Amino acid sequence: KAGVTQTPRYLIKTRGQQVTLSCSPISGHRSVSWYQQTPGQGLQFLFEYFSETQRNKGNFPGRFSGRQFSNSRSEMNVSTLELGDSALYLCASSAKQGTEAFFGQGTRLTVV
Amino acid sequence: AQSVTQLGSHVSVSEGALVLLRCNYSSSVPPYLFWYVQYPNQGLQLLLKYTTGATLVKGINGFEAEFKKSETSFHLTKPSAHMSDAAEYFCAVSDRDDMRFGAGTRLTVKP
């Protein structure tokens, strides 16, 4: 069974640009969560989707958005990038809400 | 809502010494508890989990954790540290609806 796949693995963007990250969950998993990880702030919850609906959202500005498709694949978008958005973005999928989460390897975003 | 506190953002042990990483949780319902490990530039990997049943849970790489309801704790232990155990460890709690992660503990293993 394939694991959680995140693309791309590495990304360099310029301030003011926007970026879209992709996450393909484990087959059959309907819950997808996104996290931002930085050395200073640690692991911070962005949002969670279940069956195409956003269930929970963390304390991030509206520049951060996401969506989930009918095949459970998810994307997150960050608009008007700031230097502080440089981070490792992690996606996790679960078979059911609140159960064991399986993580992808992450996308390392660098904003210059 | 549930929450997790990991005591000690950094723990350093000598190779062969006992590893003890502390985790306390709060939850209004019987929790599911998890420990994850993260190596540099990688995602989080599940070490072990407690859902119901036996309170002493064994995981991968020789780690184990004990659920103590009276102490609201789920500390992670390993009898003898290896250099390869150096990583960041995260405790997580779930009320079956949401999962919350602790801030993480970075484990350093000295030769």
Image (cartoon, coloured by chain):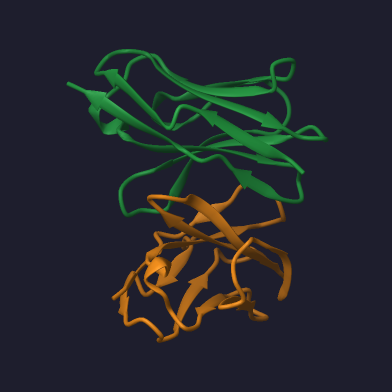
Chain colours: A orange, B green
Lateral position of residue A57 relative to residue B27, left or right: left
Q: How many marks?
A: 0
Single out the residue that lies furthest toward the right.
B29
| Image quarter of residue B92 | top right
- Spot occupied by residue B29 in the image (x, y as percentages of width and height): 82, 35
On-image quarter of the N terminus of chain B: top right
- Residue B78: image quadrant is top left
Which residue appears farthest toward the left when viewing the image? B111
Relative image position of residue A21 (x, y in whole percent): 46, 76
Left or right: A106, with B40 as reference point = right
- Measured as percent of width and height from the top left, residue A59 is found at 63, 61
Lateral position of residue B11 relative to residue A25, left or right: left
Q: Is residue B90 above or below residue B82?
A: below
Q: Residue furthest bottom?
A: A17
Residue in view at x 41 percent, y 53 percent: B43
**Residue B42 against residue A18 in the figure, above or below:** above
Q: Is residue A72 depicted above or below B65 in this figure?
A: below
In percent of the image, x 82 and y 35: which residue is there?
Answer: B28
Residue drawn at x 70%, y 34% as measured from the top left = B51
